[in-house]
Image (cartoon, rainbow, N blue to C red):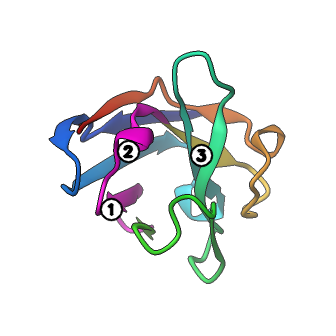
Amino acid sequence: QVQLVESGGGLVQAGGSLRLSCAASGRAFRTLGMGWFRQAPGLEREFVAGINWSGERIYYSDSVKGRFTISRDNAKNMVYLQMNSLKPEDTAVYYCAAAELGIVSASAQAYSHWGQGTQVTVSS
């Protein structure tokens, strides 16, 4: 079993930055592919960024490419999402997710473990 706990969300003005963190426990973290998803009110959960077990493969959604950076520290069992140049449309609950195959995927179905989420609100 894998437990994921997100932190770092909050309220920020447009153009600002936030850094989300996800702490993983349970199964060996270095074997997991990790992803960040988000869900805004009334909308479906959408892929934001993903990183494979080694950190060598990284994908971003087009909406965040160039503004967000995903990274991981396998020694600390942590994955991060650095969010810069935030826009009001980035407002959502952000979820950390783990894929047991170690892959990176934009599909939520590839991820079998999810955190509780952290709220990010960007004011205009």
Q: Nearer the viewer, mark 1 or mark 2?
A: 1
Q: How far apart are marks 1 and 2 (CA)?
A: 15 Å
Residue, far bottom: 56
Q: Mark 3 points at which residue?
A: 27
In the foreground, 50 or 48 = 48
Image quadrant holding the N terminus, namely: top right
N-terminal of the pair, mark 1 or mark 2, is: 2
Q: How crowded is mark 2: few (under 14 residues within 10 Å), some or many (20 or more)?
A: some
In the foreground, 108 or 34 = 108
Q: Residues within 10 Å of mark 1 (few under 14, many from 20)?
A: some
Please say whether residue 58 is one of the residues in the magenta stretch: no
Q: Mark 2 points at which residue?
A: 23
111 left or right of 42? right
Q: In which quarter of the image is residue 73?
A: bottom left
Q: How far apart are marks 2 and 3 (CA)?
A: 12 Å
Q: In the rendered view, would you say 27 is above or below 101? A: above
Secondary element under disc 3, as helix, strand or loop, is loop
What is the magenta range?
73-94
- Amino acid at circle 1: Gln
Q: Which residue is drawn at 74% across and 50% down?
A: 100
Q: Do the residues labelled 2 and 3 touch (CB within 8 Å)?
A: no
N-terminal of the pair, mark 1 or mark 3, is: 3
- Amino acid at circle 2: Ala
Label of residue 82 in the image? 1
36 left or right of 111? left
Q: Which residue is drawn at 23% across and 48% down?
A: 14
Q: Residue at x 32, y 48 (%)?
A: 20
Where in the figure is residue 106, as x and y percent of width and height? 74, 54
Where in the figure is residue 79, as x and y percent of width and height? 42, 57
